Image: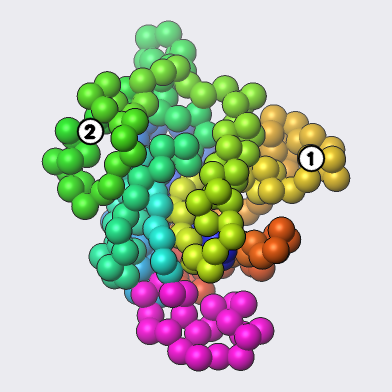
Amino acid sequence: MILYVIRHAQSANNALWAATGTNDGRNADPPLTDLGHQQAQHLARYLAAPVEEVYSHADRHDRGGFSLTHLYTSLMIRSIATAGYVAAATGLPLRAWTEIHERGGLHQMEPDTGADVGVAGPNRAWFAAEYPHLILPDAVGDAGWWNRDRETEEEFLPRARVVWRQLLERHGDTNDRVAVVSHGGFFQSLLWALLSADALPPPAHMGVRALWFGVSNTAISRFEFHDGIAAIRYLNRVDHLPTELITG
């Protein structure tokens, strides 16, 4: 398996933080900005570019194209919107994966109390109306995909480990080339899940403060799994973006 982990394009929350340095006015499930839509379109064209035959070492850097076979997205709007461009450009089915959501899930500050509480997520009927091309897991029903309190920091890493196991179960012993469109915080957890817990000291707050892997909006990171060996080929590539569109 070759795995591409891609961060969503710029969201309204990303733009808010960049402009103000605060989360005041944060949206629990923000849409893409106009700039984010431009980023996603560049990403989609780049991933769908015609495949060319190249020398094997150059292929490790995807100089011959990506030849994606599978495309997954989280159920957060910014991720679905980003991946939707990729699905349209590549012709791949777009499958939702509940567990690859951003750290914390859907949550919002209550203006009166200041408490950070969980916010209900859209249900199956809403997704069918708004994103009819999106293939939903059976578990998404009438109650909505998110209907609980905010996810705690202690839950971040275990969830990422579950996703790694599921990736290997679905694609690990294949030649599949899998793209996962997800989030900056989840990307941190996923890398910590891949890195041996015995080889590194446990990160404070699951890597939130101890170590941060930089990942820009629509950045691509490539991982390879063959014969029980995992290789990180590159991280945080934004070759597809003009300089003025790089954010995050």
Please state the horizontal and vertical placement of residue 31, each as a whole percent of the image.
Answer: 30, 44
Q: Which residues are magenta?
A: 47-67
Q: Is residue 245 above or below residue 119?
A: below
Please state the horizontal and vertical placement of residue 97, each as a whole percent of the image.
Answer: 41, 43
Q: Is residue 218 above or below residue 18?
A: below
The amino acid type, in three-letter code, at marker 1 is Ala
The amino acid type, in three-letter code, at marker 2 is Arg
- Quadrant containing the N terminus is bottom right
- Residues packed near mark 2 inside 10 Å, few (<14), some (14 to 19) or many (20 plus): some
Question: 30 or 141, which is in the foreground?
Answer: 141
Name the residue located 64 percent from the left edge and 24 percent from the top edge.
154
- Label 2's element? helix
Name the residue located 75 percent from the left edge and 31 percent from the top edge.
204
Name the residue located 46 percent from the left edge and 54 percent from the top edge.
180
The answer, for residue 172, to whether it is visible in the render is yes
Please state the horizontal and vertical placement of residue 100, each as a whole percent of the image.
Answer: 48, 41
Question: 128 or 82, which is in the foreground?
Answer: 128
Q: Which mark is residue 124?
A: 2
* Residue topped by disc 1: 197
